[in-house]
Image (tube, rainbow, N blue to C red):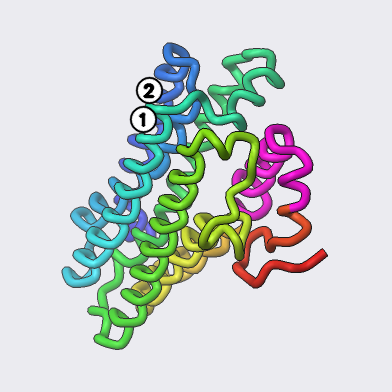
Amino acid sequence: MTAALQPLWPFAAFSLLVMLLVWALQLRTRNAGYVDVAWALMLGCAALYFGWAGHGDSYARTLIAVMGGLWGFRLGLHLCARVLHEPEDGRYAFLRVHWGGDQRKFLAFFIFQAVLTVLFALPFLAVAQNPRPPGTAAVVIAAVFWLSSWLGESIADRQLARFRADVRNRGKTCRDGLWRYSRHPNYFFEWLHWFAYVILAFGSPLFWFSVAGPILMFVSLRYVTGVPYVEAQSLRSRGDDYRDYQRSTNAFFPWWPRKH
């Protein structure tokens, strides 16, 4: 297993360097939202790097490079467009005030993001080190997970962006399209897509690393860095309208709205 983990250490060092540079960038721009952009783009880079540096089957390495790379870069570019054209995300603006502008705490936060990037890159490494070529059925099932998640997350992102772009919706909560059935459909589809790599990693000496992907992503999005922070900011900015949304709509898994 030690040899299988070898490509991980250069990526870990690179992730730390990138996050330190992004921390320095937010010092200048006063916008910590760049950490989200870096996180997504680094995962895209991880898929490409492990696809090249892995020692597994060439078909498996090609699949992980294409699927993981496209997912990471699409999300990164989407987030970059938001960061460049909007003020600092309310979550980070709140932390800036809450921490009294203490850059030591921001530095620790950015270093923690580098650690998370490495952890979430483990499923890519598991696939890239798989000596067995994935069968046709496995590729089809993985592709269904990946494509449906790609489309779902892309649609949810576009629906929210369109809603936010309308000045008449200031102070209101998006209930359009997929947002009618989940308060965080983008997070749900982001989590769902990680199951594609579990399927492609069957037979890998690092298979259990692929299983860690959806587990860590669910815990992170639902209970740590995702839903709690976004909902706290939504309550600060939209108040009773968002409380009504919470009462009627599931937090994560899509379902029909409840009447109350």
Residue 217 in sight: no
Q: Which residue is mark 1?
A: 18
Location of residue 2 in the rendering, given as x and y in whole percent from the top left corner: 37, 57
* Real-space Cα separation, disc 2 to disc 1, in angstroms: 5 Å
Location of residue 253 in the rendering, given as x and y in whole percent from the top left corner: 62, 67
Q: Amino acid at mark 1?
A: Val
Location of residue 228 in the rendering, given as x and y in whole percent from the top left corner: 69, 45
- Answer with the quarter of the image where residue 183 lies: bottom right
Residue at 28%, 79% (x, y): give it: 139
In the picture shown, does residue 153 fall above or below 112?
below
Q: Which residue is mark 2?
A: 21
Residue contact between numbered discs 2 and 1, judged by CB atoms under 8 Å? yes
Q: Amino acid at mark 2?
A: Leu
Location of residue 231 in the rendering, given as x and y in whole percent from the top left corner: 68, 44
Residue at 66%, 25% (x, y): give it: 94
Q: Secondary structure at mark 2?
A: helix
Q: Which residues are magenta?
A: 220-244
User: Which SS type dominates the magenta stretch?
Assistant: helix
Q: Secondary structure at mark 1?
A: helix
Residue 214 in sight: yes
